[in-house]
Image: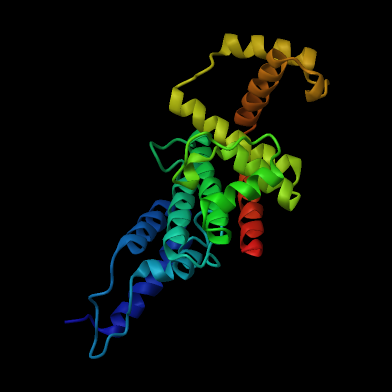
Amino acid sequence: MGQDKEKLKKLLQLIGELLKVEGNEWFGLQLLEILSNKDFTSFSSGGRELIGTINQNVDSIHKYLTLDVIPMIDYSSIPDERVKNQLFRDCLEMGKYRLGKINDTINFDEFCKYAHLQAEELLNYYYMIVFGDLSKIIVDIKEYCKFYKEPSKNITSITQIDYTIKLIAFQNKFNLKYKLKEILMKLKNLRNEQSHRATIDQVEEEIIFRDYEKVKDKRLAFMTDIEKETFKKAELIIFRRTSDFDSVYLALDHLKSTVINSI
């Protein structure tokens, strides 16, 4: 038997007040996780009032619960429920690392990992929803990324096309700003470092910065391959040290808006 409606309303009011209290961010995050994963299809009261899963309404739920908790990217305009929910969950994980809710430590690298997962999901979603067929996707990518070479063997998934290639093609097609593309590339590079455990120690960083000072004012086109690698490593170290969370949010939000406006 369902609980008294008035009591439940009071409970909701209490939850709303609790979410506004500084220090209760963990409570909002845990509550949001419970709601976003729980299936409510079995609930009914006389006639079924709640239809489908809470995931189908996750956009309106997260807007309410995260108002005073963490910045969230609004994915509510993504038509595909599966994609929208995955993006939302990755954004939620990203927020946890920004707030230091995992192991009580703010972790920019993990924050960037979940940001990259969202960027990758958005690009894959764009190409699949607009073209559907892999052969058509490859034709479009080749048009906007001239150095892309079609694989010698047949590919069966959009995920088999390198992320960098998709990002460059997308950037050229929609005239994304260079800085935005660079942020999205740094997210990928940080994630790759984590995957390969390619930790750079303090001494090595100083050597990289010493060489970086010699080449940082050069145009990339005039750099040697070694100089380009030094430049890339130094820029990534600076990106990590700066830990500009807001720039990552802005880059993701811009990518999301471009995808939505293009499908």
Report the number of discs: 0
Image spot of residue 67 (x, y percent): 52, 62
Image spot of residue 184 (x, y percent): 62, 40
Give me the residue at 61% from left, 14% from top: 205
Q: Is residue 14 left or right of residue 181?
A: left
Image quadrant containing the N terminus: bottom left
Give me the residue at 53% from left, 46% from top: 120
**Which residue is the extreme one toward the bottom?**
46
Image spot of residue 24 (x, y percent): 42, 54
Image quadrant containing the C terminus: bottom right
Image spot of residue 176 (x, y percent): 73, 48
Give me the residue at 66% from left, 54% from top: 254
Give me the residue at 78% from left, 20% from top: 216
Residue 136 makes an appearance in the image: yes
Q: Is residue 54 left or right of residue 205?
A: left
Tell me: residue 30, above or below residue 241: below
